[in-house]
Amino acid sequence: MNAAIPSTSPQEPSEVRPPDVGLGDLDEDARGELFDVLQGQLPEVWRLMRQGDPLESVVVVPSMTIERLGPSAGALNQAMEERFLFLLLLLRQPRLRMVYVTSMPIHEHVIEYYLSLLPGVIPSHARARLTLVAVGDSSPTPLTDKLLERPRMLARIASLVPDPARSHLLPYTSTTRERDLSLLLGIPMYAPDPRLYPLGTKTGCRRVFAEAGVAHPFGAEDLHSIDDVVDAVIALHAARPAARWAMVKLNEGVSGSGNALVDLAGLPAGPGGPGSADDVELRAVATERVRGMQLEDEQVDTDAYLRRLEERGGIVEERVVGDEVRSPSVQLRVTPLGELEILSTHDQILGGPTGQSYLGARFPADPAYATAITAEAEKVGRVLAGKGVLGRFALDFVVVRQGTDWQTQAIEINLRRGGTTHPFLTLQFLTDGVYVHEEGRFRTPSGAERHLVATDHLEDEALRGLDVDDLFDLVARAGLHFDQSRQTGVVFHMISSITECGRVGMTAIGDTPDSAQDVFDRAESALLAEARASLSPLPLPLRGRLGEGLW
């Protein structure tokens, strides 16, 4: 049975009323001032949380502001909202209460799966402290927008918070819509102030890198037209004549989807001055190259891409090359008490048409450059903390090996939780371990090392033949469940997308890089073999019985 948990819990409020006061009459400045007052509560909430305060609670709203196309857009949005279910592992804190909001109900067995991972906690006790709220809207509209359109549902969520002075909102991203949600719920938000959003755009990143004195690719920012892009490409070609490719990036692109490649090979030198024949030829060729750029998102054509550039802005920068190129990242956070913390490093696994789409990660990053990127990330983190950034964020780097040396260049700031957040926190919550950034290693309380390989993109059409219970049956039969005694194994996520999207995510944990990869490979092979076997035709005896009308 495809059971799902309705929006009920043991803490159901006796009365739900729409909010008495809305935000419609307040302009942005007034909302910002109210938000500042509300955020002023967060340091005390943080102190109480660290002390295990009995009334501490958290409201999780994993809304993503990403345009999705296609008939499965709503299902994929739901799966991405469920990607945050690793946060249920926080319920190992015996007094914590959690409200988890999604667009559609979550399958009951998915909740049971996560609660079964809790070490030292009775699952039914944790379940009693968890309230699931489903909007009942499967459209690809961002979850936060769905909530803001439904005052009664907001009132219900607010009524589930035991004490607003001891609670906070935990979003995936931080826009003015999440700010408004925070104001309507009356609880502070553990995320960056949306007024700082420009710092996380591609243009803002380059400016922060320059301020921090961190190396980053040659290029230009704040571009809003094809002429701007052509000018930047010509300037890049003049300054870096050996550069083979230029990258064009939309300011608000996510996971590489806003990137494009411009071929610079054979571009005329253009030694003449402006308006000269050489200059005219160079500009004509450069314009042609820009119009023929290779887009990472194959569902978007060049004209649509350039319209987005005009609306949102973007950058051009040199594509870094070398003997070997890798794409690591560093996770950091600034606590409400103003503490800057280095959380983790990862080697990102990239793919897609131009090799710019995020597919997964390995943790920790290679020790050959992990400490180097950490030092650079810390410089950027201090600049961001000085500007008031709060919560988790990540920095992406390109590291290039020239001979035996690795050179690092920063390329992106993600002022939000990203694709490396949930694998790392899953590992941390399950093992109580910590990343020792001075060593570039993750260690459990016993001193043992742990490594992981994770993906959000285990995809195959054959997976559509499986449902949630088929997956869990395989987990049990193939021994893929996370083993608490050994602290190794697999944790699946985005489970609800397996049938409609043919896609699932997983985090494989081992005690060495090779063993983590082995766990990953074994789980992937077992899952795909099970899925493909499910597509086999019915056995002849059964087909005969069906033909006799026995069914």
Image (cartoon, rainbow, N blue to C red):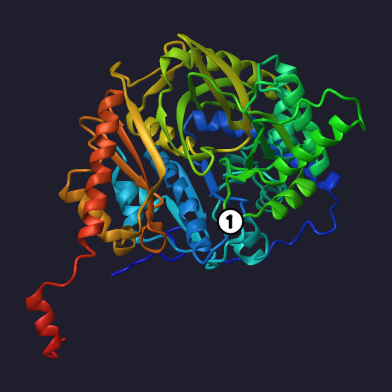
In the rendered view, would you say 331 is above or below 538?
A: above
Residue 507 shown left or right of residue 196 in the figure? left
Residue 472 shown left or right of residue 196 in the figure? left
Question: 292 or 210, which lies in front?
Answer: 292
Which amino acid, mark 1? Answer: Gln
Report the residue that reaches farthest toward the front. Answer: 277
Residue 145 image-quadrant placement: bottom right
Q: Position of residue 434 (x, y in %)?
A: 41, 22
Report the residue that reaches farthest toward the top. Answer: 404
What residue appears at the point 61 percent right and 61 percent down from the top-left corner? 141
What residue appears at the point 79 percent right and 33 percent down from the top-left corner? 282
State which quarter of the image contains the N terminus.
Answer: bottom left
Residue 387 in view, yes or no: no
Residue 283 image-quadrant placement: top right
Secondary structure under badge 1? loop
Question: 321 or 492, which lies in front?
Answer: 321
In the rendered view, would you say 154 is above or below 209?
A: below
Q: Position of residue 79 (x, y in %)?
A: 46, 55
Question: 244 or 322, which lies in front?
Answer: 244
Residue 407 shown left or right of residue 43 in the figure? left
Residue under label 1, please give it. 299
Residue 68 image-quadrant placement: bottom right
Report the residue that reaches farthest toward the left. Answer: 541
Q: Position of residue 82 (x, y in %)?
A: 45, 52
Q: Position of residue 418 (x, y in %)?
A: 53, 38
State which quarter of the image contains the C terminus.
Answer: bottom left
Q: How many other residues sit within 10 Å of disc 1, few (<14), some (14-19) or many (≥20)?
A: few
Residue 29 shown left or right of residue 346 in the figure? right
In the rendered view, would you say 369 is above or below 538?
A: above
Residue 364 in view, yes or no: yes
Report the residue that reaches farthest toward the right. Answer: 275
